Image (cartoon, rainbow, N blue to C red):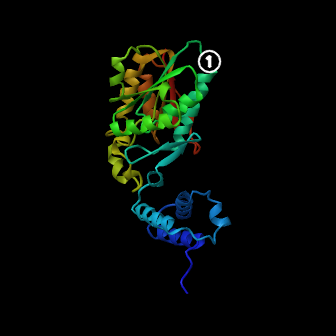
Amino acid sequence: MKQRVTIRNILNEIVLEFKRREIKESRLNAEILLSWVLKEPRPYLYLKSDYVPSPCKIFLLKKLVKKRLSHIPLSYLMGEQDFMGLKFRVTPAVYIPRPETEILVEKAVKILQEKPISKDENIIIDLGTGCGNISISLAKQLNNFKLYAVEISRDALRIARQNAQRHKVEKKINFLWGDVFSPLRKINLKGRARLIISNPPYIPGVELKKLSLEVKKEPSIALDGGEDGLKFYRRIIREAPYFLEKEGIIALEIGYNQAKRIKELIIAQPELRSPEFVQDYGGIQRVIISRRR
């Protein structure tokens, strides 16, 4: 007798396929993909395990499973990624937001809210905005702030604008095309920024080949931090004081084992104070914070 195409049987089959192809967290991946296709929460897969999905749902699922077997990230297959409780549209043109970057945003918000905001409009600069997750999350949580989000990829910038419209903060963010601070020099922002924030590319060039197959599907421009991984930190730290107001903040996400070297870059910059670090959930120094003197 032919096996019924129930949710239970489909799920088990996908898990086996994923395990054969060494897809990490095979069951979780299968559950997420199947629940997304069915437009139901994951517990539904077990509560309704005898349900037989429609042929069109099964057809779509097979297409997505085939792509996942070629190590295309789940977020690209589903076209979205959660970040700070919000859903962001993502495509292969943008880096997929990570939970670690939420620590960067949370710390920035906490610091900004500690001191009363006296001006009608305060400036935040987000360098390398990608899908816009940092800028948009800040815009949703903070009032009296104007954001400038810079991105060198035109495709990524288009996605960021769409995400800003999706979350109804497009009027609070100016999206600018260009490389790091370059487009900001055309605007009168000298000494005006309360915060400069960034999760720049920080993977050393020699390590790019060692990345997982999934990460290699993401845009290399968002990963490659130059020969030693510090290319963009040098530029940001060198140029940030020009844009920061007195006691303005620079907040950067950093890679594993980079804390000491990036601290040295900041200490060597006379206009910046000695930095502090914030650890991630694994105890790794993940965020570095400094202020303009």
214 sits left or right of 166 in the view: left
Q: Residue at x 48, y 34 (%)?
A: 165
Q: Is residue 56 above or below residue 259?
A: below
Instruction: Kindly tell me whether residue 260 is visible in this rendering.
Output: yes
Task: Give the residue number, with chain letter if any, for mark 1.
Answer: 115
The percent position of residue 173, horizontal first and vertical second, equals 47, 26
Residue 174 in percent (x, y) is at 43, 25
Which sits in the foreground, 75 or 51? 51
User: Closest to the observer: 106 or 76?
Assistant: 76
- Amino acid type, residue under disc 1 in the picture: Lys
Residue at 41% x, 39% y is: 159
In terms of image quadrants, where is residue 258?
A: top left
Q: Residues within 10 Å of mark 1 (few under 14, many from 20)?
A: few
Task: For residue 274, say whether it is visible.
Answer: no
Taking the spot 40% from the left edge, 16% from the top edge, the residue there is 242
Indicate the secondary structure of the residue bearing disc 1: loop
- Which residue is rendered at x = 54% and y = 33% of the image? 137
